């Protein structure tokens, strides 16, 4: 069976055994409204139904069983989870029977629901980190995908469509977006999702006392290539409390290092963690601890530093620093050690343009090196008439000079040495003519010059705001990119 669109539906021929006056009833969250995941050929499948799919009239516990399952699919009653791995022969829709049994009187309710398998490869969430980054545009977060708010706040969380993408091998577009609670049940009545603008909005309820710990509400942002089913999802939280503990650190902080080098990293707790909108003080911190910190490093909770020695093998280790306040709230500061057997943090250097007859300046950024403070940098661009116009300033690692009018190109080699290791990378400076504009286009000339300077600065500072934050061994190493209109990235 080929690709197709199918609307999720419930077969309402409900079988109820003594379930009207007592026991289990249908006023839960129907299975079909939970947007069951689409099965994909040769891909592992998993879908967990909400524990409120059926409810008891007498406050009993509902247990679930499923009948009429295809051979590839199984259901675990204890976790309420479907699992399996469909094959090409399983493509299409099929009906299952969901049975709920009330523990108080063994009354039962059953309904038939539709599930499906597609042979289209479908779609995916581009990055949970990108979702968190977009969430942070709506306010302060807890460092772990939670927007921190107070009761009575009006919220508006808008996501971009580029959070989801179809696989290159997919033939189906993304046709629908949904908002649900994280367990796929309906949204609480104080928040609304607009599938056209991809916006969650509402007014935060008064659900906790002023000094009680915050309450987390978990949500799911879903995209699909079939109506009524889920193709991919991203999850986030709204954290509601009388006191708001938050952090401005919304992305993973990467600490670069070379094998065998020392670790000395300061954690900016007193500047990047906030209580009720103000930098937190030590007096309002009840506890600080690390999670998953590798054994080659040690966290000192008194002076907020991590020390140690990187291992003798390349590795990437993720860990978290958790900060708790006196009201029972917590934030997480995400970190990652990126240990490499390399002096450089980049694979290659891009070529740059130099406008003939104009002043040229190009700075070698400290962020190019895993340990800039312990790295000796030298530059080689030869000698002779082709290079005697160019000078290297060791104090700020800058190349500058007046580009000759007959200049074509020059190879520049950057040599780095750290802990007896040596490594080199090179790039080309390419001569280009100055753009000539008419006198009647003076406004355009100014705009062009401004744009060029911006491009130069962009090249020198190549780290994207949506990428993880890269730190050297100390947060004090803030590299400044200098671009004066002529040292621009070469395309």
Image (tube, rainbow, N blue to C red):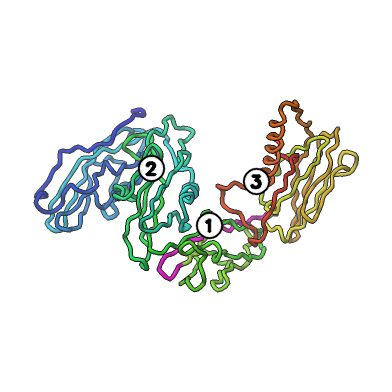
Q: Quadrant of the C terminus?
A: top right
Between the C-alphas of marks 1 and 3, the distance is 20 Å
Find out whether the residues at labels 2 and 1 contact each other: C-beta distance under 8 Å.
no
Secondary structure beneath disc 1? Answer: loop
Mark 3 surroundings: few (<14), some (14-19) or many (≥20) residues within 10 A? few
Image x and y of residue 94, in percent:
26, 36
> What residue is disc 3 on?
462
Query: Which residue is drawn at the image coordinates 72% and 39% (left, top)?
Result: 488
In the rendered structure, the answer to whether residue 379 lies left or right of residue 212 reads right
Image x and y of residue 441, in percent:
71, 28
Check the image and report above or below for 17 versus 338: above
Q: Is residue 353 magenta?
A: no
Mark 1 surroundings: few (<14), some (14-19) or many (≥20) residues within 10 A? many
On residue 222, which mark appears?
2
Query: Which residue is drawn at the image coordinates 59% and 46% (left, top)?
Result: 464
Image x and y of residue 410, in percent:
81, 39
Camera-side residue: 171 or 305?
A: 305
Q: Look at the image and give the residue range highlighted in magenta.
A: 324-343
Camera-side residue: 479 or 226?
A: 479
Secondary structure beneath disc 2? Answer: strand
């Amino acid at each position: 069976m080929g690709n197709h669109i199918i609307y999720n539906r419930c077969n309402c021929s409900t079988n109820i055994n003594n379930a009207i006056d007592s026991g289990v009833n249908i006023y839960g969250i129907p299975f079909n409204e939970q947007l069951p995941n689409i099965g994909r050929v040769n891909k592992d499948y998993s879908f967990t139904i909400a524990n409120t799919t059926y409810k008891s009239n007498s406050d009993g516990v509902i247990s679930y069983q499923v009948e009429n399952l295809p051979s590839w699919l199984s259901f675990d009653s204890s976790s309420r989870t479907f699992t399996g791995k469909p094959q090409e022969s399983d493509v299409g829709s099929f009906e299952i029977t969901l049975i709920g049994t009330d523990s108080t009187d063994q009354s039962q309710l059953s309904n038939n629901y539709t599930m499906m398998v597609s042979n289209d490869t479908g779609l995916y969430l581009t990055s949970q980190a990108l979702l968190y980054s977009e969430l942070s545009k709506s306010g302060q977060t807890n460092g772990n995908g939670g927007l921190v708010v107070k009761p009575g706040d009006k919220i508006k969380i808008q996501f971009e469509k580029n959070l989801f993408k179809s696989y290159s091998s997919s033939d189906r577009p993304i046709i629908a977006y949904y908002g649900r609670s994280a367990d796929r049940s309906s949204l609480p009545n104080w928040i609304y999702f607009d599938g056209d603008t991809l916006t969650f909005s509402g007014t935060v309820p008064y659900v906790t006392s002023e000094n009680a710990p915050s309450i987390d509400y978990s949500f799911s942002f879903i995209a699909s290539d079939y109506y009524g089913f889920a193709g991919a999802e991203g999850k986030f939280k709204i954290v509601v409390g009388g006191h708001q503990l938050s952090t401005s650190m919304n992305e993973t902080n990467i600490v670069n290092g070379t094998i065998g080098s020392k670790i000395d990293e300061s954690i900016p707790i007193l500047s990047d963690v906030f209580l009720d909108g103000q930098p937190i003080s030590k007096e309002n911190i009840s506890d600080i601890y690390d999670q998953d910190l590798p054994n080659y490093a040690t966290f000192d909770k008194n002076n907020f530093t991590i020390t140690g020695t990187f291992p003798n093998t390349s590795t990437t280790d993720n860990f978290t620093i958790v900060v708790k306040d006196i009201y029972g709230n917590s934030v997480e500061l995400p970190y990652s050690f990126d240990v490499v057997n390399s002096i450089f943090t980049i694979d290659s250097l891009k070529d740059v343009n130099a406008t003939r007859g104009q002043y040229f300046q190009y700075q070698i950024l400290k962020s190019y090196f895993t340990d800039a403070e312990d790295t000796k940098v030298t530059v080689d661009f030869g000698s002779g008439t082709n290079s005697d116009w160019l000078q290297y300033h060791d104090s700020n690692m800058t190349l500058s000079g007046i580009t000759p009018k007959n200049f074509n190109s020059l190879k520049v080699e950057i040599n780095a040495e750290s802990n007896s290791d040596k490594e080199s990378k090179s790039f080309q400076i390419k001569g280009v003519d100055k753009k000539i504009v008419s006198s009647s286009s003076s406004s355009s000339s100014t705009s062009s010059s401004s744009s060029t300077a911006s491009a130069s600065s962009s090249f020198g500072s190549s780290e994207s705001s949506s990428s993880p934050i890269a730190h050297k061994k100390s947060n004090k190493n803030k590299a400044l990119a200098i671009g004066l209109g002529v040292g621009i990235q070469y395309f």
